[in-house]
Every structure is written in structure tokens, then in C-alpha cells.
Image (cartoon, helix red, strand yellow):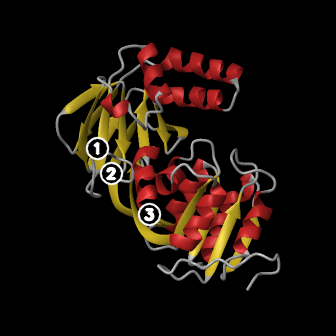
Amino acid sequence: MTDAAGEAPCPLTPHVPLRSVEIVVNPKSGGVGAKATDDVQRIMRRFACDAHVVEAEPAQVEKALQDALAAKPDLLVVLAGDGTARAAASMAGPHGPLIAPLPGGTMNLLPKALYGAVDWREALENTLSEGVARPVSGGEVGGRPFYVAAVLGSPALWAPAREAVRLGKPKLAWLYAKRAARRAFSGRVRFRLDGQELHRSEAIAFLSPLVSKALDEPVGLEAAVLNPTDAAEAFRLAARALFSDWRADPSVETRTVRRARAWARTRIPAVLDGEPIQLENDVEVRFVPVAFRALAPASASASASAKGAA
């Protein structure tokens, strides 16, 4: 038996019911492209479910997510940037529909943690055919959610420069690097972990159980204290991606926490799941045991990729 395009139909995952699927596509996102909506529709025609695909410009994405969730689907698929993936997960929460954040951004931290380093088309097909419901733990910084990692402090200033290099924009990277160097050591972050003694450092990072190599169970966040001695060392930490082998770096020390407080003299630069932002100068950090539910393959290879992807 074949569909109208002459392709054999694909069986849906037997692990969860997928009667209705809402899909939001932002073609202007860095890893998506103008033909993505057509590709999504072609893939969905091969699966026996009611799929509704919406293409949204950046200014329309939030409204598109709200409308998609209002339809109460079994699954919300998002093909957009890192910020949109984080927004969809936050809006759905632990009691909303399953979320499938496909890799359509530049860093793709959350998609890589769930699906490994695969193309979004492969991630979508694998998820629809093999996906299981996965509760995802995360955290909040000053009320802002993150599901992979949050970095607070001056090394976060290097993230835009690193991304500009990845995108092949050397002039922009140089401007970001100059700005980061000027601000890198203008002030340290003060923090308390689980209400214990006061510490100071250039930066502190929090990793969720989704990617932490130190946590086998969702019992807290892995807190890593970063202490680069100069701008060159801060750049080295940023260049190593801050989410891979930096935990073995001699200027990093880690522990498990459920709550923390961080403050500084000025607003705190930060990166939440790949998105650079400015926080207030005094923020609370807390662990969220179940932040949302993802639909992702349960294969051993995907799990292994998840632990090494961020």
C-alpha cells in the first residue's frame, strides 16, 4: 500500500497516541530554510495522523505557538531557533502536550540533547516512528527557564563571538570579542549554592540532568564554578563550547544543587540554552524536576548522543 506520492506509509510510534500534531515552522531561523515547510508536509503525509502545519515569521512565532497549544494536540513540533524551542517547552509545561523541538537554530542545544547530532528531517521521522514520552528536568534563573544549561557571568559574553565565527562572520565576531574583552573582568558573580557559604567567581554554570555527565538521576542541577584567570582563558573556555569537555578543565569545579542565588554589582550576562541574555543583578536559580514532556526516540544511541551533545 502506498500514499498519493507513491511512498509506502510509515507506522507511527506504538508508545504514545498521536492522533493530532501541530507543527510550527519559522523559515527565517538559521537552520531551517525556505523549503522546510514543504519538506515537513511531505514527511507528515507518510504518517497516519491529523497534522496541521503553520509557517510563522519571527514576529508571529509566539502567537503561532499559543494557537497550536490552544488546539490541544497530542504533539507540538517546533522547527525554529533555540529561543523558540525553549519558549514552546515553557508554554507547554509538565501538563501540556508532548514537545518535539527539532534542530532549526544555530546551537540547537535542546534538540541535540534529545535527538543527537542529526538533521531535523531525520529527527522528525525517528520521533514519529519510534518516540517515547520523556519527562525533561530543567531549571529557572530569575524566572526564565532553561533545559540544558545556563551560564552566568563574563564568559557568557564570548558566546555571541563564538556563534559569529560558526556562521562565518569574522568582522561581527571581532566586534563581539572586543566587547567581551572590555567587560570580561569588570565584576565577579557572588553566589550561594543551596544556602551554604558565599562564593565569588568569574562565572557559574548550571547543567540539567539531560546533559550532565555527573548526574544519573534528576535530583538537581550540576553547578560548575568557572574561574578563568584572564580574558585568554575565558575565550578558551568559550571556544571549547562551555557544554562539552570544559568540566575537566582545571579552572572548573562542580557540585549538585537544587537552589542557588547569584548577584553582582551590575546586570549579569548569561547564556540560557544557547541564547545570550542580560539578567537582573540579583537572581534566584532553582531546579525543576519535571519541566515539560518531550517526544524522542528511546534508542541507546540517542541517549548516548544526548549526554555528549551539550
Label annotation for residue 299? 3
Q: Find the distance from the CA under tag 1 to the CA under tag 3.
A: 34 Å
* Residue 283, percent from left and from top: 38, 42
Would residue 36 appear left or right of 162 to someone viewing this image?
right
Would residue 198 appear left or right of 184 to someone viewing this image?
left
Instruction: Identify the secondary structure beneath mark 2.
Output: strand
Q: Nearer the viewer, residue 308 or 159?
A: 308
Q: Nearer the viewer, residue 229 or 310?
A: 310
Q: Circle 1 is placed at which residue position? A: 260
Q: Circle 2 is placed at which residue position? A: 286
Instruction: Identify the secondary structure beneath mark 1.
Output: strand
Instruction: Identify the secondary structure beneath mark 3.
Output: loop
Up/down of 286 relative to 201, above or below: below
In the figure, residue 233 lies in which quadrant? Answer: top left
Q: Find the distance from the CA under tag 2 to the CA under tag 1.
A: 6 Å
Q: Nearer the viewer, residue 125 or 156?
A: 125
Q: Find the distance from the CA under tag 3 to the CA under tag 2.
A: 30 Å
Q: For the point 51% across and 47% down, which residue is it?
A: 109
Tell me the crowding category of disc 1: few under 14, some 14 to 19, or many 20 or more residues within 10 angstroms, Cα based.
many
Q: Is residue 79 visible?
A: no
For the residues labelled 2 and 1, say whether their Cβ atoms are less than 8 Å apart: yes
Q: For the point 32% across and 45% down, which residue is it?
A: 213
Quarter of the N terminus within the rendering? bottom right
For the residues labelled 1 and 3, say whether their Cβ atoms are less than 8 Å apart: no
* Residue 188, percent from left and from top: 36, 23
Up/down of 232 relative to 151, above or below: above
Question: Which of pointers 1 and 3 indicates the residue nearer the eye?
Answer: 3
In the figure, residue 189 lies in which quadrant? Answer: top left
Q: For the point 66% across and 82% down, which residue is it?
A: 48
Q: Is residue 98 visible?
A: yes
